[in-house]
Amino acid sequence: MDPFIFVVIILVASILQTSTGFGFSILATPFLLLIFKPIEAIQINLILSLVISCSLLTKIRNDIDFGILKRFVIGSASGLPIGIIIFLLIDINKLKLGISLIILVLTIILMLQFRINQTNGRDFLVGGLSGSLTTSIGMPGPPLLLYFSGTDTQKEKLRGTTLAFYLFIYFVSLLIQIIFAGTDKTIWISSGFALPLVLVGLYLGQLLFKYINQSLFRIFTYIILLFTGIYLFIESWKW
């Protein structure tokens, strides 16, 4: 592991997660897969994301839409076991290829100003997709981000509801990963090393959040999704 690369990944991803509510797993996981085994990268991401969600809960509780949150949680119950089966059975590069294509296609649709209405049924579906992506590659963010962007949700509500959902989904996913895939010392030592960086990122991210307006927030969203989709696509063809 290159310590400098690790520091940069964790710090930047922590700032992004705190300021937007969705950035850590989307940004960190593809890069962590470069320097760790898949199981290590995913579990480090889950542990640190859980810490971030716990740390921010008191600050964002007034922005949470509890109705949507409840439906996300219920919907994720079907996706969590599907995700761990995918993780255990499917080649990681094929998984990254499929996810990259989904992210890129849906992002282009959003950039073309396609909009959808938020419904209870779609809340359940998005929760299920998010659950399956969390246990398979540790990335619950894309379905939530694409859904909230498509429904033109305010940035405060997006950040609050997604962070609250992450608190549940990361905890359950980490337990499922440990039970079915195991864990090792590298995961916990690396996570401990990263904690001070996460705390710095939390502070800087909170400052940044105050200065991001709705228009800039949307542009930021598209850039992150395109970057992640392209990066995962390239990485999936390297082996």
Image (tube, rainbow, N blue to C red):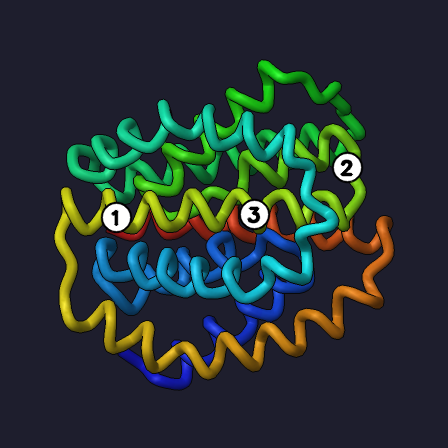
Apparent side of residue 214 relative to residue 237 in the rendered image (left or right): right
Q: Confirm or deny contact between disc 3 and disc 2 (CB under 8 A).
A: no
Identify the residue at image location x=85%, y=50%: 214
Provide the residue designation for mark 1.
175
Please tell me the numbered disc located at residue 164: 3
The quadrant in which residue 32 appears is bottom left
Please tell me the numbered disc located at residue 153: 2
Give whichever of discs 3 and 2 has the lower sequence position.
Answer: 2
Q: Confirm or deny contact between disc 2 and disc 1 (CB under 8 A).
A: no
Which of the two discs, 3 and 2, sits closer to the camera? 3
Q: Looking at the figure, which quarter contains the N terminus? A: bottom left
Q: Is residue 92 above or below residue 73?
A: below
Element type at marker 1?
helix
The amino acid sitting under disc 2 is Thr
Task: Name the foreground residue: 122 vs 86.
Answer: 122
- Residue 1 seen in this snapshot: yes
Give whichever of discs 2 and 1 has the lower sequence position.
Answer: 2
Identify the residue at image location x=25%, y=65%: 36
Task: Name the foreground residue: 88 vs 131.
Answer: 131
Residue 24 place in picture, x, y as percent = 51, 59
The amino acid sitting under disc 1 is Leu
The amino acid sitting under disc 3 is Ala
Instruction: Bin the neighbour count of mark 3 within 10 Å (Cα to Cα): few under 14, some 14-19, many 20 and up.
Output: many
Q: For the residues marked 2 and 1, what is the alpha-carbon distance in whole angstroms?
A: 31 Å
Number of marks drawn: 3
Which of the two discs, 2 and 1, sits closer to the camera? 1
Element type at marker 3?
helix
